[in-house]
Image (cartoon, rainbow, N blue to C red):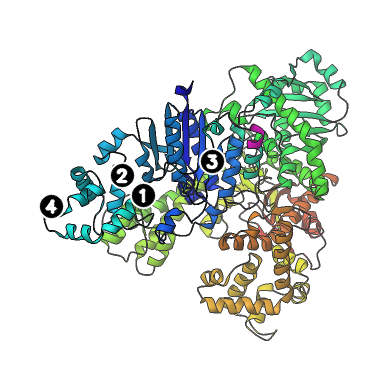
Amino acid sequence: MASEKHLLLIDGNSVAFRAFFALHSQINTFINHSGLHTNAIYAFNTMLDVVLKKFAPTHILVAFDAGKTTFRTKKYDNYKGQRAKTPSELSEQLPFLHDLLKAYGICSYELVNYEADDIIGTLAKRAVDKGFKKVDIVTGDRDLTQLATDQVTVNVTVKGVNHLEAYTPEHIAEKYQLTPRQIIDMKGLAGDTSDNYPGVTKVGEKTAIKLLKKYHSVEGIYEHLAQMKPSKMKENLQNDKQQAFLSKDLATIKQDAPVTVELEDLAYHGQDIAALRRFYQEMDFNSFLSKLADPEADKKREKVKFQKLVQADIPAVLAGFTGPVTFYLEMLASNYHVAPFAGFVIGQKGQWYVSTDVKLLQQPAFTAFFADEKQEKLVFDAKRTYVGLNRLGIKLAGIRFDLLLVSYLLNPNDSGNDLGKIAHLHQYQDVATDEEIYGKGAKRALPEDVQVLYQHLAQKAQAIEQLQAPLDKRLEENEQDGLFKEMELPLAIVLAQMEIAGIRVDKKQLNQLRKQFAQRLETVKQKIYAEAEEEFNINSSKQLGKILFEKMNLPVIKKTKTGYSTAVGVLEQLRPIAPIASDVLDYRGLAKLQSTYIDGLLKVIHPEDQKIHTTYLQTLTATGRLSSIDPNLQNIPVRDEDGRQIRRAFVPRQADWQIFAADYSQIELRVLAHISHDHNLQQAFINGEDIHASTARRIFGLDQNAEVDPNMRRQAKAVNFGIVYGISDYGLSQNLGISRKQAKNYIDSYFQEYPNVKKYMNDIVAMAKKYGYVETLFHRRRYLPDIHSKNFNRRSFAERTAMNTPIQGSAADIIKVAMLNMQRQLKERNLQATMLLQVHDELIFEAPTKELPLLQKLVPQVMDAAVKLEVPMKVGYGSGPTWYDVKES
């Protein structure tokens, strides 16, 4: 029935502008894989979901401005003339809003010579005339409130794009004491700074409302102008009469524009799911993708067959498998060393067997199956699966495919560890995300209906099996199959073995340090109180700020929205003139060591073996470097003595053993020398020179035998490593505390002395621009979506990343090869020595004292042979009773 029709009209440009600035603070996180900024599109999409649910329209249209030239600009040249140019980051998104709307099944429309307001005004009137029960307008522009009637509500965005203020005639009367049509008169008198039309001099909204309450309209005011008492306002009204009528005309929204679209064309029939899915994939909107309703996908999910596995069927089920078998072990918590088991699924070719009883996996038929190297297994996360089965006393071999690892290698920018989300990235939708099934955060839990769990496990197994062939093909096309098979997959097992081994921690030593630090903290605290002449919460930036800058009258270095800044940089500047600043820095340093490291480590010592079992993240960084969490053992402090003391607590498993460590020296600079083929840089390494002293002599124009003082070496070191990271003259000047001109001279001198390094930098950026990615020596790729960005800062960062990734990534790859070869040697030689940790360029072992002489020869030899470079590797090593006591030989 016509009376039930409900039209929704959206002011596209206005809402897009609001959407852009609603997420402006996160603009650098909303960028898709092609380098397109997507914050406005994302917020606009969110707005669509909100208003469609709120209004449930039968008809909908989004109106856009056709351009800057309209009938209003012909009447008034400077109409909207003072508006700032639309940010390029927003302009590039506007065409994609039309694609989004098309996928939503929503008509978008623009009309040459008219604004979106006129399209909306015209269609709103037509709808009411044709008997539509209700019309809702959504806009960020209050000008449209003039269109409000008993049937038309103008909803104005208040905060962001999702909170709306509904302007009805009643609301306008309450807010302005005016009718909707008088909004036009108010604009005529007060003008509009946004649209840049003048109104009457010194007449603002309040004065305009006062006049309109008495005279009703601009025309009414001028009809009674002669009767007004002499005043400056009357004089302004007389002088600006032409401006007043022009401004009213400009403010009037057309309701008879030649709009060609018919109301029948605006009927809303819902989303085009397939088109919307493609759009979300292109935009990298994974959260929208995961929530996307797809009846067809739901039907497919329902068809995933599974049956509950019982003990009696195990031998027959396993005997029936031919070829690769998919296995998935479910653990809900992220720390798989202690996470409770939720269930498992095993099967192939659509035949899935599920159970919540993981003890079934300990049956002899299963243990033999898992240990069989020839029986190929397809899994999601090899390392997690290996550790999980190990907890059940089961050894795992024969892994052929790891969905998590393969997806990471294909695009390291798309990291994550949710199987459903990763499957969606590869256009496989027939599996739910864990968030959909288990919830998130503290609410994460198994579904009450076990059939839901079984279905989810079967979906996961089928996703792994279905994605294996196409993703393997893509690896081969990228020449990355060797990187997966020969490096990352075997490394996953090595890392699992290292995690399982763990490193022993002396709890007594940590508690002793804790006591010492607590005493020192108390001493420093009392010293601060004495200097402040009162007690206060040192951890409160607000209280500390009042002490430093109000009570003690120290110079204010920086202010924040909430008060005085007491950041490290501020305190460092105050240190020379105020002892209290130095003491606060000491207090913070000790407090962080106490809470983050000592207390943090004490919490994660396993009660049974007194060891810490970290988790290595193999699929996190875009460069391929490993990360350590729960706890992070790669950032145990090393630069200051207090921090180094914590390493005393890391000890070998028994008294007659030692900690042994070996590390690559300046590996990134050696990789740079190799890939740039720079003769001078290579020669310094070949001759065994101190590379930083050698660079100092070159950039400072010294004789090759001249003595280099410590400051020169320090500056040359900053230049060496700065070049690796594509540092600018500004960045170098900040690092060294020198002028930009001096920093530029250093960089120019460096490239003059090492010309092939400069050539490498230029060539690798050119390659990135041509192909969209760069590679390491082992074909690890990193895609650089911002390499063609119009934004200078984003493009510059992408260029620096292009320069650095092959260097840093190759260094990460080299130590991975060394780890693989080292683990193989330990096994082949039947040594008791165990590889425990990888800390960037360093490997840490524990070993019986009697094996140390062999390790001192073997480890450097294996690490040196990891890859053949055009310059020699250099490996340092040492041993000691604790990690702290390891001294390089």
- Mark 2 / mark 1, whichever is N-terminal: 2
Label placed on residue 227: 4
Element assignment for label 4? helix
Label placed on residue 260: 3
Q: Kindly check if marks 3 and 4 are in contact, taking CB atoms under 8 A apart as contact.
A: no
Label placed on residue 183: 2
Q: Residue at x 67, y 46 (%)?
A: 652
Tell me which amino acid carries mark 4.
Gln
- Mark 3 / mark 4, whichever is N-terminal: 4
- Mark 4 / mark 1, whichever is N-terminal: 4
Tell me which amino acid carries mark 1.
Ala
Q: Residue at x 51, y 77 (%)?
A: 739
- Left/right placement of residue 616 relative to residue 490 reads left
Q: Which label lies toward us, 4 or 1?
A: 4
Element assignment for label 2? helix
Query: Which region of the structure is painted magenta?
Result: 270-277
Residue 271 included in the magenta stretch of the image: yes
- Mark 2 / mark 4, whichever is N-terminal: 2
Q: Residue beneath label 1, please?
A: 251
Looking at the picture, how far across and down is residue 595, in whole percent?
Answer: 47, 46
Tell me which amino acid carries mark 2.
Ile
Label 3 – label 4 distance at C-alpha: 47 Å
